Image (cartoon, rainbow, N blue to C red):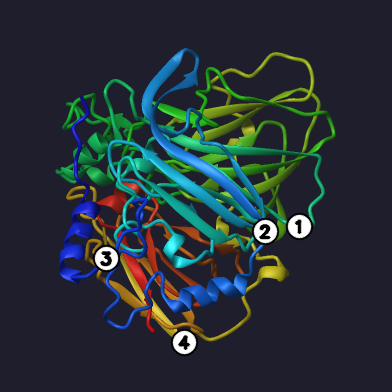
Amino acid sequence: MRIRTTTRRAALGAGLAMAGGGLLAACSKGGGPAAAPTDGGYVSPDGREVAAAEARRGTGPVRQVRLTATAARIGLGGGRTVATWAYGDTLPGPEIRVTAGDTLALTLANHLPEPTSVHWHGLALRNDMDGAPGLTQQPVKAGASHDYRFTVAHPGTYWLHPHSGVQQDRGLYAPLIVEDPKEPLSYDKEWVVVLDDWVDGVDGSTPDAVLAELSKGMGMGMGGMGGMGGMHHGGSAASGGPSRMLMGASSPVLGGDAGDVAYPHYLVNGRVPEDPQTFTARPGDRIRIRLVNAGGDTAFRVALGDHRMTITHTDGFPVEHVQTDTLLLGMGERYDVLVEAKDGVFPLTALAEGKNRSALAVLRTGGGAAPGADARPKELDTTPPAAGSLKADRSVRLPERRPDRTVTLKLTGSMEKYDWAVNGRKYAPSQRYDVRAGERVRLVFVNDTEMWHPMHLHGHTFALPGGGPRKDTAIVLPGKRLAVDFDADNPGLWMLHCHNVYHSEAGMMTVLGYRR
């Protein structure tokens, strides 16, 4: 029997409902419109400003989709089967593919034992469809359904997942591919590659139990220990199953501590490396690989054996093309690359950075034995380029402009106390940082912690400094500062948080609120 727990965010949402007095009534299907009070001079998630911004995006052909969140038994390959929650009976969930300008009309049916939602990671969409319970919508209750409908404005590689507790670290995620009607790239085949770290349903573990264990903290200053080869902490998790706390996972590329969760499996497209997915092509084919990191606590270093990759996009937006042997993806990040396939069989290896484990898929264009589960292409030995070293393609480069407003966001907390926060304050829906429509806003992330954080902004893309790429998720290294700019052109209440699902749920999350 699974013991249901109330997440901190759910409790805060309930408190907000009481404090806010009259929330907008939930719709009959159980998802509801905006779930945040509209006083205080802020644009409401379903306000007229939001409707006007959506009208400017226009409407296109309607793509209707039905998605069911449900308990499922999922095969990970190699005879391994886990009980988890998923979208239907596949991992990842069913790919959604639309064309930029289309209207996506998706009905989410919640067959889970607790409320859920869908967040459309990376999309600039209308605020009341963003899927942030307690902020932009009511939670979709167990047994209820909810209709999402919005214009998909920008082409690119995106994905979807819940924004309810730590549900994302189960099987509730799927790729969302938005095709460009004027696609400038030329390629023969396309391969969507979703990376994940997996714990749910293995020896009694659940993400909720992992969060409960982590929330007790490491104590004794062990959070910053390095050189221990990724040792497990002794003992067991709070609500059954083995301990999943990881100590000593270290990566120079990530500035030290690589992560805190010892996952039993690392997956490519839902498969363990002992039984990988095989993608077939012909020698000489140009293949577009769309990479998505759907993990909860793991950065992945990715390489395709005996090939170089040409980076074409990051987080859905084009960059000036750069060749590389390897890539680093923090949680929530996406990269698109082109490769020209050689003749043979090649490992696509996703190394769990600093954790000494890897995930695997296989590219086959000819005969030969498949690589083993432990294949480590030599390309992984090179240093992956930092996102800040890339340049935005001229077509999407943010025009030069002085910022009208600077918002400084100190990332605070430690593993010892597991008190992750922004500016020392844990998440509360009523806590906002003001912006106004039309402003150029500079976000200054100051990482005062000993850990890296992939910071994600909902509803917008920002530009990295010096003509850098347009992104919605960026790695902020420990002890470092990162300033990014965006144009405030999408009114509403927007979450800004670390995309380590355990850090965000512990409190490293806040809200940018547009003033009316």
- The x, y position of residue 234, in whole percent, is 19, 27
- The x, y position of residue 314, in whole percent, is 61, 55
Amino acid type of the residue that numbered disc 3 sits on in the rendered structure? Pro
Q: Earlier in the sequence, mark 4 or mark 3?
A: 4
> Which of 354/129 is in front?
129
> Could you say which disc has been placed on residue 181 in the image?
1
Q: Earlier in the sequence, mark 4 or mark 2?
A: 2
Which quadrant holds residue 12? Answer: bottom left
Cα gap from disc 2 to disc 1, whole angstroms? 7 Å
Q: Which residue is mark 3?
A: 429
- Which residue: 60% across, 75% down? 56
Q: Which residue is mark 2?
A: 100
- Which residue: 55% across, 53% down? 105
Kind of element beneath mark 4: loop
Q: Nearer the viewer, mark 3 or mark 2?
A: 2
- Which residue: 14% across, 43% down? 220
- The x, y position of residue 158, in whole percent, is 56, 51
